[in-house]
Amino acid sequence: MSQKHHALHERLNLLWILISAAGAVLGLRLIQLQILENVEYSMAAERNRTQMIYQTAPRGRIYDRNGVPVATNQPAFSLIYLPPKVKEKADLKPLADALAKQLNQDPDNLLETLQEAVREQSVLRLAENLPQQTAFRLWELHTIYPGVYLIVEARRYYPYGAFASHLLGYMGKMDPRSWKQFKGEGYRVDSRIGRLGIEGVFENVLRGRDGGIRMVVDAQGRLKGILDTTKSQAGSNLYLTIDAAMQKAADEGLRKSATGRGAVVALDPRDGSILAMSSAPDFDPNLLLSPDPEIVKKVVAELPEFNHAIAGVYPPGSAFKLIVSAAGLNENRINTEETVFCPGYFELGKNIFLCWNHKGHKRVNWWTGLEQSCDVYFYRMGLKIGGDFIEKYEKGFGLGQKTDVALKGEKSGHLFGPQTRQAAGRGWYDGDTVNLSIGQGELLVTPIQMAVMAAAIANRGTLWRPHYTDRIEYPEQKSEYVQKPEKMGTITLKDQVWDTLQAGMALVVSSGTGVSARITGLDVRGKTGTAQNPGGDDHAWFVSYAGRPGERPGVAVAVLVENGGHGASVAAPIARSVIMAAYHLEDKNGRVVPSTSTLSFPLPGTPNRVGGGLPVGNL
């Protein structure tokens, strides 16, 4: 073979190799397209012709201790927009104008939202919780504008409006911070989450698993059919220790009070169950689910999120005289029969400390001093007891310390005494002891702490951690959770001291400053308080507990009315209403009955009261 033919043969072989290699590459690519990537392209094609419309799952219901539903769900219409899958820019202004008219929204803002949905090719939820009439009018637009649809889904509903609003909380839209927290947990950017109170604390328990409808759409976003549906799963149901009747009485009592601001906390002294927790001013969480953005905007701007029951800190005033009494009696620094003369004021060096009764209580002993809340008696006894002992019992009863109730935002308040002052590098003086002896000075407490204190006196020494959860009922085959009571601590007093404290509180209600809390047929004991407030009018306090004659006390109540004035005339009647609700007592007209009878339980010993009568309308 000549050299020329040899070269030609080599070139032909090289050409065949190149052709074979190219064929192999094409074959491999064909295999990849037909087999390996077939699933991916099929899914992409499927996504191109379908849209998933998510439907919010029913949220777990919340019930009171008697099975009364206080947070439920109801069917609601939501307006959905499916953007067309075409490259041509659609004229969305007529749709925006038509929707804006029905939804009471700004058409320009709505147009911008629609255009964003088209650019992102994402399903848009235009409105939620629509009234039925509005939904019917919007359905007519479906025949004119492709891509506009209505779906029915579950929406949160609070059947009693502002009932226990600070405790229950409310539902709100996802904000950027929340989205960062929840985006990996099955939430969508338009999901609503629990905010404030129980709704926020138990978000993961109450939320369900959303369902949805997978729909076939054409390039213009027109619905062609439904491929399949995914059934939603409801969230877990939560049963509370709250008594709806007591909660209603607390809410209404605060709303009708002198200032409409304050808190009520009612506990079961046998285990720390919260029977009622109210904070005023309150709000209707249903308004935050309104389809009208202007209403929502206004409600959010004025939303009173501050829970006075756990975050409000106040001087306890004369209600603190119970702690001073416990310290003095248990440490044998005072006795019940020692008397002092009250001229209406007390001189300490160059300082004069006034009694609330400027005319004076004349000669009083401990029984009369507590019954009539004589400040001069407690000024003198406080100096005999000493600030160190008072501070010891103040801490022992849990004042100035968080209860760690399962709610966000609880404040600790502030302890006041020689040790606290020393830790801050400051001195302690007799004038400080005088102030502390009537619950003034730097001592700050929360209403829930005062309720724990009242409950501890009722049960003779156990400080239960307040809790509002009774049990959780899970939707799946899972054992329900049952809350167990938890002790925070124990305060140990001599039996005679417990007897004396309780008998003194009985006198306060039967014939002293707390007569407005007296109830026929119930054993009610309490202590009034009027706390001086440098920033305005005095705060009104009343702490109490009650039970049927011969039975263990079943309820302890602390009432605080901000700037309300006298605890006797402002706070005590609210506590009375709450206690009456606890025992289902009312008169023929549904009003509480003023009681003139004496208490039906025997007091330990017969108090030897000393002093004059009680001026009406004070403390």
Image (cartoon, rainbow, N blue to C red):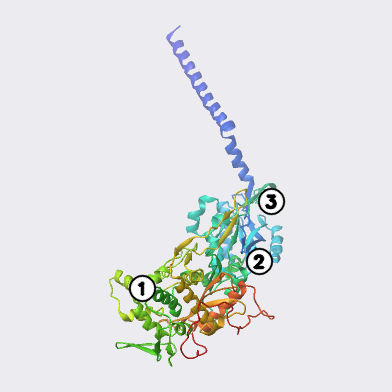
Residue 102's disc number: 2
> What residue is drawn where x is 69% and y is 60%?
141
Q: What element carries label 2?
A: helix
| Residue 110: % across, % down | 58, 63
| Quadrant of the frame with the N terminus | top left
Residue 350 in view here? yes
The residues tagged by marks 3 and 2 sit, at their Cα atoms, a distance apart of: 22 Å
> Residue under circle 3?
223
| Residue 587: % across, % down | 67, 80
Question: Label 3 crowding class (10 Å Cα cut-off): few <14, some 14-19, many 20+?
Answer: some
Q: What element carries label 3?
A: strand
| Residue 379: % across, % down | 38, 83
| Residue 225: % across, % down | 70, 48
On the picture, is 609 further left or further right than 416? Answer: right
- The tag earlier along the polypeptide, 3 or 2, is 2
- The tag earlier along the polypeptide, 1 or 2, is 2
Question: CB of mark 1 within 8 Å of CB of mark 2?
Answer: no
Q: Which of marks 1 and 2 is in front?
A: 1
Relative vertical location of residue 410 with respect to residue 594 in this rendering, above or below: above
Residue 389's disc number: 1
Question: Label 2 crowding class (10 Å Cα cut-off): few <14, some 14-19, many 20+?
Answer: few
Q: Is mark 1 on a helix, strand or loop?
A: helix
Of residue 8 and residue 503, the one placed in the foreground of this image is 503
Amino acid marked by disc 2 = Gln
Of residue 560 and residue 161, the one placed in the foreground of this image is 560
Amino acid marked by disc 3 = Leu
Q: Which residue lies furthest to the front in this view?
A: 605
Question: Label 1 crowding class (10 Å Cα cut-off): few <14, some 14-19, many 20+?
Answer: some
Question: CB of mark 3 within 8 Å of CB of mark 2?
Answer: no
